[in-house]
Image (cartoon, rainbow, N blue to C red):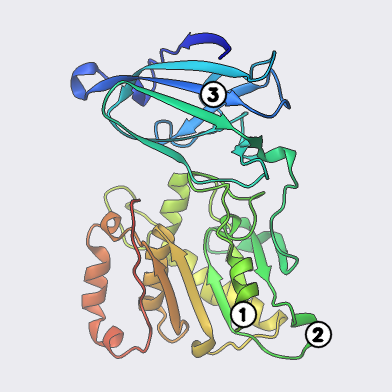
Amino acid sequence: MVFKRILPLFFSYLIFVLPVFSQSRYQVTIEVKNTPTSHLHDPLYMTGNFNGWNPKLHMLDTLPSGTTPLHSRIILPEVKAGLLEFKFTRGDWQTLEATAMGTLTAPRNIMIQKDTVIRIDIAGWRDDFPASTASPQVHLLDSAFYIPQFAVKRPVWIYLPKDYATSDKKYPVLYMHDGQDLFDEATSQGRIGPLEWGVDEAIDRHRQSAIVVAVAHAESKEDRQNEYFVSPNSRFPNPQGAGYLKFIVHTLKPYIDGHYRTLPDKKHTAMAGSSVGGLLTLYAGLSYPDVFGSLGVFSPSIWLDEGQVQKTITRIGHQAAISDQHYYFLWWRE
């Protein structure tokens, strides 16, 4: 095994090196094999739950050159005990590590409970493969759709069924949040991304066709959460979720119904979201039961809402009880 060099990395400002007395810490050695011969000498970055998933905050090394196999050994001397989640990039979300076929994977994760050696084989880099993974049915409706409730502009995507252009049918509509994560690895970001949800592929395979409208979330995690929370809480005393839902109901939906062949009634209008997007979707059903006939509420982060949604349900309990909506709750490790 050929190692380029050993790099002790003392990240004094990282979560890795909080005061030693606050929590157990261990040495983690990462041995990285760079199988592809492309991008030699490019910087190698590590992003993960230790740095807020910033893809260009912590440079570890440069990709090694020389004879195959090519390796770097990186020593992280003070890693906090617990779950370590991470990915490797060359500086941004478009240059993530990938499989040999160019597809992306979920975050690498390991439970740190002792000094640990991790061996990583980087099989490929995402930017060496075609960027877009969206199906031909996905279109950028507007790169800067105006949201009057916030006085901002956001990208909005629309998925049209395969037979939309060859038929005169009208279709149900599903409104979804986190639009950049739904269809295309080229636009997806963050802990899960760039790993798209595959919404277009799923509907392509389904017998029932539908239109999907997807609104991009705000750039930062904090702004996204502020826009998706409806009720005030300790972190977001002035959330904008109610305004966001007004945008969907009073601005975006009328536009979609006016420009596309939709079935605009409650029975054929749905909303779906995950995490705080799931929480927002739950509030949409409670706030607009005459608009949304079906909801997909996935892992809705109710605990972050500090009991506010329960109070809302209690306040409009009778109305919610007689609704024919269906609520789906799925959860796993957040």
Query: Crowding at label 3, few (<14), some or many (≥20) Cα neighbours within 10 Å?
Result: many
Residue at numbered disc 2: 166
The amino acid marked with disc number 1 is Ala
Residue 144 image offset from top left, x and y in percent? 68, 57
Q: How far is the residue under mark 1 from the one under mark 3?
A: 44 Å
Q: Closer to the camera, 291 or 95?
A: 95
Q: Is residue 122 left or right of residue 293?
A: right
- Of the two numbered discs 3 and 2 in the rendering, the one whose residue sits closer to the viewer: 3
Asked if residue 238 is positioned above or below residue 127 in the image, the reply reads: below
The crowding category of the residue bearing disc 1, from other C-alpha atoms within 10 Å (few below 14, some 14 to 19, many at least 20), is many
Pointer 3 with pointer 2, Cβ within 8 A: no
First reached walking from the N terminus: tag 3 or tag 2: 3
- Report the residue at 48% width, 44% height from top: 191
Of the numbered discs 1 and 3, the one sitting upstream in the chain is 3
Percent across and percent down for residue 217 are: 54, 55
Relative to 313, 73 lies left or right: right
Q: Amino acid at mark 2?
A: Thr
Residue 282 image offset from top left, x and y in percent: 37, 71
Read off the residue under disc 3. Answer: 32
Dot 1 and dot 2 residues touching (CB under 8 Å): no
Relative to residue 66, is residue 201 depicted above or below? below
